[in-house]
């Protein structure tokens, strides 16, 4: 039996499907990967899938080698993999979404035999993949809400403090000069780490329900490490705002009390920095920069 394979079609299908899967995995890691890294990872996975067509040897061995190399390459290029345990967690989520997407596509093909020819074509496969991607994204399938809490280690001048943090999408605070995301800590935690005479003081404006607007004192934290599900994220020069009220309850998350609220923007590439139109080009974000900025 003779088969004709179109390399360009195979590459396109695998590239787009890899994009769907990597974006879903990225959503569960609080978008730790930027768009260019996701594109590069998807391309590497698609190229590796074509390797069995170029190599000699048993078909099963070539297929396994192509999938293994492509999967490892996709994850290591896309995400900041810090160790084996983090890689295995990412692999677990990639496999979960892969089997979920593949199983759902097979179900749709069997449910609509009359249009099977269209569904198994290039446009049909990409269309079904896109619909399933939107469905998984909207429903939050594959994501545990308990992942919103994590262990945090705050570092300054050789001193470290442990904290329990809540990653809250409702925290949209930004430092007014640079537009960088701001995390919130309670007064007790800040005083234990910072002591007196904090440098790099900033005023962080905010508004909330019950209080139309206000300001919080902000400082530049030299080091922050977050740990969740065997995955570690390391950040430098993170802005924190000090809350005079205790950060204790976590609402409906059902988790233990926390004393820090993380802005999800720090997980994006380059810390989620957004430039303002009137930002000074020589703003170095040092401890003394904009000391009295409002």
Image: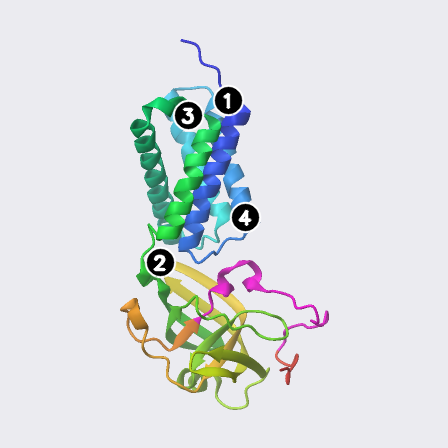
Residue beneath disc 3: 62
Give above or below for 222 relative to 23: below
Q: Are marks 3 and 2 in contact (CB under 8 Å)?
A: no
Q: Are marks 1 and 4 in contact (CB under 8 Å)?
A: no
Foreground of the two, 197 or 177: 177
Foreground of the two, 209 or 270: 209
Q: Which mark is residue 37?
A: 4
Q: Residue at x 58, y 74 (%)?
A: 175
Residue beneath disc 2: 230
Q: Position of residue 280 (x, y in %)?
A: 71, 72
Q: Which mark is residue 54?
A: 1
Q: Position of residue 274 (x, y in %)?
A: 61, 65
Image quadrant in which the N terminus is located: top left
* Gap between marks 1 and 4 measured at Cα: 26 Å
Q: Nearer the viewer, mark 1 or mark 4?
A: 4
Of the residues under marks 1 and 2, which one precedes in the sequence? 1
- Segment colored magenta: 262-286
Name the residue at the top extreme: 1
* Gap between marks 3 and 4 measured at Cα: 26 Å
Colour logic? rainbow
Image quadrant in which the C terminus is located: bottom right
Q: Is residue 178 left or right of residue 99?
A: right
Q: Is residue 242 left or right of residue 255?
A: right
Of the residues under marks 3 and 2, which one precedes in the sequence? 3
Q: Are marks 1 and 2 in contact (CB under 8 Å)?
A: no
Of the residues under marks 1 and 4, which one precedes in the sequence? 4
Q: Are marks 4 and 2 in contact (CB under 8 Å)?
A: no
């Amino acid at each position: 039996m003779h088969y004709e394979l179109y390399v360009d079609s195979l590459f396109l299908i695998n590239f787009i499907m890899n994009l769907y899967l990597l974006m879903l995995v990225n959503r569960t890691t609080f978008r730790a990967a930027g768009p260019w890294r996701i594109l590069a990872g998807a391309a590497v996975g698609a190229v590796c899938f074509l390797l069995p067509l170029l190599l000699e040897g048993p078909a099963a061995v070539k297929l396994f080698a192509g999938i293994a190399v492509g999967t490892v390459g996709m994850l290591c290029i896309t995400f900041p993999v810090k160790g084996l345990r983090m890689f295995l967690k990412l692999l677990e989520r990639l496999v979960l979404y892969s089997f979920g997407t593949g199983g759902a596509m097979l179900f749709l093909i069997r449910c609509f035999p009359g249009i099977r020819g269209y569904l198994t074509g290039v446009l049909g496969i990409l269309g079904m993949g896109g619909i399933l991607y939107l469905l998984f994204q909207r429903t939050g399938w594959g994501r545990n809400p308990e992942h919103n809490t994590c262990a945090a280690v705050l570092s300054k001048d050789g001193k470290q403090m442990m904290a329990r943090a809540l990653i809250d999408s409702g925290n949209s605070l930004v430092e007014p000069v640079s537009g960088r995301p701001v995390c919130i800590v309670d007064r007790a935690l800040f005083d234990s780490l910072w002591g007196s005479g904090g440098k790099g003081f900033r005023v962080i404006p905010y508004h909330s329900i019950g209080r139309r607007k206000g300001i919080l004192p902000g400082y530049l934290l030299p080091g922050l490490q977050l740990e969740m599900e065997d995955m570690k994220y390391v950040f430098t020069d993170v802005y924190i705002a000090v809350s005079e009220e205790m950060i204790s309850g976590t609402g409906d998350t059902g988790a233990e009390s926390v004393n820090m609220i993380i802005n999800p923007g720090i997980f994006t590439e380059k810390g989620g920095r957004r430039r303002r139109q009137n930002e000074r080009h020589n703003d170095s974000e040092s401890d003394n920069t904009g000391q009295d900025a409002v």
